[in-house]
């Protein structure tokens, strides 16, 4: 198939899922065309079977806000026509599904049907989509999509209940490539020990966090939890990513006297090399529709201490492959981290269970066929129209 993909190319879960999906689809022999304002950050531009089409957004003194969604719709229609796309898959409803709807209508005028799939990721529904100024048009574009998927059962329910969406929504969970996201070879413990030296001494525990540092991630809680752990145990914290709350986190680490134990690594595109080095992942978010960062860590045998919100319980089985707590309960999260780190047997069992969950339920080999079958059903459907 020839598949167009549109996503936010910047640091964030929906862009990661879209990019990894494109890479996996190309590896299966499909032709993938990314259409976005810049190249998605996990792409090198040299992957075979993957093409990138930039959306130029020209400005004009009259435009206080350059109309990206219109430029995107034009480019989608052009790419679909020139490269004979069979289907378009947009990640994050706002504004991508509206642009796809316009592109579909433009092409219909020329006798071509371009079905499009909208994948809902979370904040497009739970935060941004609930804003009155975006709600009616987002509702409309979701309803008009040829196919809709949500990354968790939780998100499907919220979309149907809060958005009053009546059309079917397919749940296709986030996925991870278990051959890339994996523990460092267990047969070579010294390799992990050596790789870890840049981040922590051999006798120190290493905690990790990965996000786009937005308020919903509660970065201050990450620092609060770590400060309590560091009072009880020799430990270090590595934070991967960047975003609006980074300076608050830096300030809090200073205030709590742990700044010399906290490393801000910034945006990293090879997170699969860092996650296996950690003993625990911290994800104390206010909301997560799924929690891709925790899944990526779990595939690397790094279990997560997380909050019981949104779709996280669809991934983390409390006490088995990770630990769940109420939002904001930093004391309980810190106590749990200390307790598990002091109990190597329990910690090891949780590490293994985390990897097993990723392998048995969320590997790309299991989830990819779901997307491909979904595309095929929609393309076949449109062939019969
Ligand atoms: O929260 C983010 O990292 C950004 C956001 C996005 O859409 O880019 O992530 C959402 O999509 C991820 C991938 O599907 C999910 O795993 C995250 O849980 C979800 N974030 C929230 O719901 C807050």
Image (tube, helix red, strand yellow):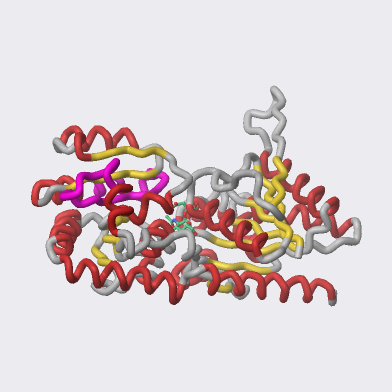
Q: Nearer the viewer, residue 20 or 307?
A: 20
User: Is residue 136 visible in this depiction of the protein?
Assistant: no
Residue 148 sits in quarter: bottom right
Identity of the residue drawn at 29% across and 36% down: 248
Task: Using residue 275 as the reference point, say whether residue 52 is left or right of it.
Answer: right
Residue 135 sits in quarter: bottom right
Residue 155 place in picture, x, y as percent: 47, 66
Toward the top, the furthest residue is 61
Report the number of discs.
Answer: 0
Decide whether residue 225 is among the magenta residues: no
Task: Using residue 340 as the reference point, say whether residue 175 is left or right of it.
Answer: right
Residue 252 place in picture, x, y as percent: 22, 37
Identity of the residue drawn at 69% across and 70% down: 375
Residue 149 place in picture, x, y as percent: 58, 68
Q: From what the image shows, is residue 171 above or below residue 268?
A: below
Identity of the residue drawn at 87% across and 61% down: 112
Task: Using residue 82 as the reference point, say whether residue 304 is left or right of it.
Answer: left
Residue 146 sits in quarter: bottom right
Decide whether residue 219 is among the magenta residues: yes
The quarter of the rendered structure image containing the C terminus is bottom right
Q: Which residues lie in the magenta part?
A: 196-224
The quarter of the rendered structure image containing the N terminus is bottom right
Q: Nearer the viewer, residue 349 or 83?
A: 349
Q: From what the image shows, is residue 16 above or below residue 351?
A: above
User: Is residue 249 visible in this depiction of the protein?
Assistant: yes
Q: Nearer the viewer, residue 128 or 359?
A: 359
Toward the left, the furthest residue is 232
Residue 361 place in picture, x, y as percent: 45, 75
Q: From what the image shows, is residue 364 above or below residue 78?
A: below
Identity of the residue drawn at 66% across and 33% down: 66
């Amino acid at each position: 198939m020839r598949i167009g993909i549109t996503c936010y190319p910047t640091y964030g879960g929906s862009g990661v899922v879209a990019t990894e999906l494109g890479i996996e689809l190309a590896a299966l022999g499909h032709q993938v065309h990314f259409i976005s304002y810049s190249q998605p950050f996990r792409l090198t531009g040299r992957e075979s079977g993957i093409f990138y089409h930039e959306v130029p957004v020209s400005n004009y003194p009259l435009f206080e806000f350059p109309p990206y969604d219109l430029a995107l719709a034009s480019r989608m229609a052009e790419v679909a026509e020139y490269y004979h796309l069979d289907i378009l898959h947009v990640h994050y409803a706002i504004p991508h599904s509206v642009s796809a709807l316009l592109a579909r209508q433009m092409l219909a005028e020329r006798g071509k049907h371009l079905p499009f799939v909208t994948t809902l990721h979370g904040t497009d529904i739970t935060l941004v989509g609930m804003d009155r100024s975006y709600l009616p048009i987002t509702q409309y574009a979701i309803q008009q999509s040829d196919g809709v998927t949500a990354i968790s059962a939780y998100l499907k329910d919220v979309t149907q209940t809060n958005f009053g969406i009546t059309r079917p929504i397919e749940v296709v969970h986030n996925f991870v490539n278990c051959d890339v996201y994996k523990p460092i070879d267990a047969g070579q413990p010294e390799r992990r020990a050596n790789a870890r030296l840049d981040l922590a001494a051999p006798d120190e525990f290493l905690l990790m966090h990965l996000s786009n540092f937005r308020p919903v991630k509660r970065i201050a809680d990450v620092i609060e939890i770590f400060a309590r752990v560091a009072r009880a145990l020799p430990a270090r914290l590595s934070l991967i990513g960047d975003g609006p709350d980074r300076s608050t986190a830096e300030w809090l680490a200073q205030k709590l006297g742990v700044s010399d134990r906290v490393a801000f690594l910034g945006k990293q595109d090879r997170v699969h090399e860092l996650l296996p080095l950690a003993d625990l992942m911290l994800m104390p978010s206010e909301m997560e529709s799924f929690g891709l960062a925790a899944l990526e860590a779990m595939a690397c045998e790094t279990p997560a201490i997380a909050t019981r919100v949104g779709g996280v319980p669809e991934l983390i089985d409390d006490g088995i492959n990770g630990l769940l707590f109420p939002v904001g309960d930093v004391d309980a999260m810190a106590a749990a981290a200390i307790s598990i780190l002091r109990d190597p047997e329990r910690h090891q069992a949780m590490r293994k269970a985390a990897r097993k969950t990723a392998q048995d339920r969320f590997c790309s080999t299991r989830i990819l066929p779901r997307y491909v079958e979904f595309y095929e059903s929609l393309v076949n459907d449109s062939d019969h129209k």
